[in-house]
Amino acid sequence: MLNMKKSFIILGAMAAAAVAFVSCGGQKPNELTAQEQQDGWQLLFDGQTLSGWRDYNGTELTGPWTVVDGAIEAEGQGGDASGYIVTDKEYANFDLKWEWKISKGGNSGMLYHVVERPDFKVPYITGPEYQLIDDDNFAEMNDGYQLEDWQRCGVDYAMYVPDLEARNMKPAGQWNQSEIIFDNGHVTYLLNGKVTVEFDAWTPDWRQRKESGKWKDAPEYGMSPKGHICLQDHGYPAWFRNIKIKELPSKPVEKDLFNGKDLTGWINYGTELWYVDDSCYLVCESGPDKQYGYFATEDYYDDFDLTLEFKQEANGNSGVFIRSTVDGTTVHGWQVEVAPKGNDTGGVYESYGRGWLYQIPDEKENILKEGQWNAMRIRLEGDHLQSWLNGEPMTDIHDAKIGAGHGRIALQIHDGGGIKVRWRNIHVKTL
């Protein structure tokens, strides 16, 4: 992926070249061996159709992609704002292999953990990219533009750069084999059997690179632990085949989200007040602006079992957001309500679009203990959301939009002023 004026020509020899029917390793493309099937590999391309792929943020595939001689062909009509296709299915931990070749001076990419949402106009602001590009001829075909090291083939685009001299890359028009292994945050990229980069996502080093470089204004870049696989047509012909994936098991994480001492691991959105009091409790309190405020985890949590305690003081209008993102103080996600008695604490509200998804029965309003500590539990797995208040079940719903969501856990302070809520024992276990 690059953002620049570019020009290219498709060489006649490239257009006429036949696609070899033997893959890099001597195996027929777009088929799995019996051993691969036994080991859990699955094809993402059947060699004949684009079944299982569609436009990013779309419901069908409209181009510019075709199948030619057993390969997916990017026709070279895309650009920075268009030309992306994604898998129907999302993937979390995986071993992904594919073969690819590119036109002279060409540029493309393989992205993963891509999140779809209408306000995400392009996939690369959420999904990391394994860069696919013709280093040798890019300047010649693009008005002399010289690539930065972080733009070269095999890099984790704009994040991690390999030893460029050690790469074993074949020239434009020849098939290369690439691989991405994402194993619970440990990431390895390979090019023709050699490691190009290896790193750990979401570490302090990873965050420093993200926040000081190209992605400093893309807060959701690389944050989702699950998402779509994505191919890029970036205005140059490119070909893909033998795309196969093996899903790897997820390792549960169990941790306290609040350490009782400071605000480590959280992001404050807005101007309202969040602090740790003398009793080592987390406090949210209305500030002078009396606006909405959100206090969100740095990390995403998709499937989890969350427990916490809260005590409402003054007006206790707050909430716990799940699979949510925040832009300024505009939140996209779902709220398990925390509010004064009579206002559906434990119910579920969508912050955009549909409003209330579930309001609790009137007879359950007395489960809330105003002015005292309350225990809340939220369990979310796939599209199944459950909540409990002081041990009593409050919500048990299935919802497709929630099931497709990704994001942070966030605490809310409502607008209007006069609000104060204390929190403690915030503990999460991923599923």
Image: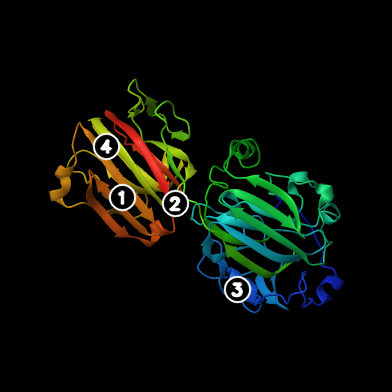
Point out the tag, 2 or 1, that comes first from the N-terminus.
2
Q: Name the residue under label 3.
A: 37
What is the three-letter code of the residue carrying label 3? Gln
Q: How far apart are marks 4 and 1 (CA)?
A: 13 Å
**In the rendering, at what x and y percent does residue 174 appear?**
82, 67
Point out the tag, 3 or 2, that comes first from the N-terminus.
3
Q: Distance between the residues labelled 2 and 1?
A: 17 Å
Disc 2 crowd, CA 10 A, few/some/many (<14, 14-19, 20+): many
Residue 20: mark: none
Q: Name the residue under label 4.
A: 317
Disc 1 crowd, CA 10 A, few/some/many (<14, 14-19, 20+): many
Residue 349: mark: 1
**In the rendering, at what x and y percent does residue 49 appear?**
62, 77
Point out the tag, 3 or 4, that comes first from the N-terminus.
3
What is the three-letter code of the residue carrying label 1? Tyr
Q: Is residue 279 above or below residue 413?
A: above
Q: Mark 2 points at which residue?
A: 302
**In the rendering, at what x and y percent does residue 55 appear?**
56, 65
Q: Distance between the residues labelled 4 and 2?
A: 25 Å
